[in-house]
Amino acid sequence: MIEACIFDLDGVIVDTAKYHFIAWRRLANELGFDFSEEDNEKLKGVSRIDSLNLILQWGGIEMSEDKKQEWATRKNDWYREYILKMGADEMLEGVREFLDQLKANDIKYALGSASKNAGTVMKQIGLENEFQAIIDGTKTTKGKPDPQVFQMGADAMGVAPENCIVFEDAAKGVEAALNGGFYAVGVGKPEHLAKAHMVISGFKNLGWQDILNGIQQ
Ligand code: B16
Ligand code: MG
């Protein structure tokens, strides 16, 4: 019996992944190297500092912890320039209608994001007051694939993981959901999200019943 849903933010509710990519690429370019969109896939759902460590590894660059903090802050400033221009029109197609279906079916919903900017993005798109809980990178101590972020969301809603569906665009996020005993719906390309109970390309024209059928409830 499904009672609740937990949504990842970047790549599920909004396409901020493209802004993260632009900002990280700018950082790499300033350090004298580049990385591909395929590499960027490995950064999805990964915390800011872990993303920086991966990128530096790709560029073969070593730096002190202080310098890393400086670059991480610089990247975040570039990223925030983009998100502060966002409006409700940047909510991905079909998300609003899907949330309305959840409401109509008495299904609770929370946010489970690795991002420390999640609160800002939710405010920009006008969703800051409607989720039962917003669990983000400012509240967690462990990153995906650890299920902590989703467990905190489920606890805040008072539901058990086995009665809850997580929507995720990142392979690490799908893993986190499965590690916590949740149902996982991948949002994106099946080749990146093979472990999920089902994969959708997005929320456009998606019925709540399609999801229940897809995860075989
Ligand atoms: P920030 P999600 C994740 O958000 C992003 O996918 C990932 O690319 C980003 O590095 C991470 O948040 C941290 O974001 O730098 O804003 O704290 O997909 O878990 O909603
Ligand atoms: Mg994501």
Image (tube, rainbow, N blue to C red):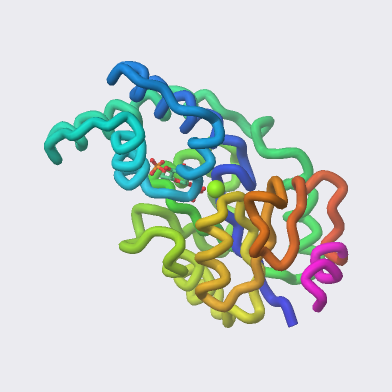
Query: Residue at 51% of width from left, 39% of height from top?
Result: 121
Quadrant in the picture for the C terminus: bottom right
Query: Residue at 50% of width from left, 67% of height from top?
Result: 150
Q: How many marks?
A: 0
Residue 100 appears left or right of 45: right
Dominant SS of magenta comes to helix
Vertical side of 197 occupied by 171: above or below: above
Vertical side of 155 occupied by 14: above or below: above
Quadrant in the picture for the N terminus: bottom right
The image quarter in which residue 30 lies: top left
Asked if residue 214 is among those painted magenta in the image, a careful observer would answer yes
Query: Residue at 61% of width from left, 50% of height from top?
Result: 169
Asked if residue 93 is among those painted magenta in the image, a careful observer would answer no
Residue 140 appears left or right of 37: left
Q: Residue furthest front?
A: 60
Ligand 1's quadrant: top left
User: What x and y, as percent, mark residue 14?
Assistant: 61, 39
Query: Residue at 47% of width from left, 32% of height from top?
Result: 20
Q: Nearer the viewer, residue 9 or 38?
A: 38
Q: Which residues are magenta?
A: 210-217
Vertical side of 178 occupied by 77: above or below: above
Q: Nearer the viewer, residue 144 or 102?
A: 144
User: What x and y, as percent, mark residue 96?
Assistant: 74, 46
User: What x and y, as percent, mark residue 130?
Assistant: 61, 55
Q: Nearer the viewer, residue 49 or 80?
A: 49
